[in-house]
Amino acid sequence: MSKKFLFICAFAAIIPFAACNDNSTSSSQEAHFEADGWALYNTSWEVAYKVWRGSSDDTLRVNAGCLSEHLNIKFLDSDSSIVNPPEDSDHSLSWTVADTTIFNIYQEEAGWGFHLKGIKEGTTSLILKVLHVDHSDVITPEIPIIVEEKLDPEDCPFQDDDEN
């Protein structure tokens, strides 16, 4: 074999190791957010939904044509103690709604809270995620969502007048 061929092979073998040595904060292990559970609180700071280590018997409900009460997100650590959401710009709330013809998520502004917006009666599910740049650090199991009978806007308890 020629020296040039051996040099190219050696250089090609070294490149992957050099590329994996990225110590930037956005990709370091310390930047990943970890939680053993989620707690969604209503505006009275009562638990509306709680999942810890993948287990929950809770269901979220909203009427069709209405917004739910604002839900604030907190997290639970390995002792089930409350942990605040990450505050850095690399983390954000994301979600997947199984059937967006039944309900969707409404946020007044980006952050760690939201409303359910009932569209039509039915049952579906929601998965919440802590998005870290381009991947999820933490996700919920499927959260059951029940959208109940349609109410007139003036009968919706938490309706935002701009969201009819």
Image (cartoon, rainbow, N blue to C red):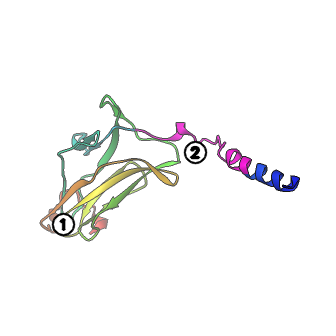
Which residue lies most toward the front here?
1
Residue 128 coordinates in the image, percent (x, y): 34, 52
Query: Percent position (x, y) of residue 29?
Result: 54, 38
Q: Amino acid at mark 1?
A: Ala
Within 10 Å of disc 2 (Cα), the crowding (few <14, some 14-19, many 20+) is few
The residue at which mark 1 appears reads as 64
Q: What's drawn in magenta, residue-wise?
A: 13-34
The quarter of the picture where residue 101 lies is bottom left
Residue 5 rendering spot, x and y as whole percentages: 82, 56
> Which residue is situated farthest in the right direction here?
3
Helix, strand or loop status at disc 2: loop
Residue 123: quadrant of the picture:
bottom left
Label number found at residue 21: none
Q: Position of residue 161 (x, y in %)?
A: 27, 64
Residue at horizontal 80 percent and vertical 54 percent from the top: 8
Q: Residues within 10 Å of mark 1 (few under 14, many from 20)?
A: many
Q: Earlier in the sequence, mark 1 or mark 2?
A: 2
Q: Quadrant of the N terminus?
A: bottom right
* Residue at 43% across, 54% down: 110
Furthest-top residue in view?
A: 79
> Which kind of residue does numbered mark 2 sit on?
Ser
Q: Which label sits on residue 27? A: 2
Image quadrant containing the C terminus: bottom left
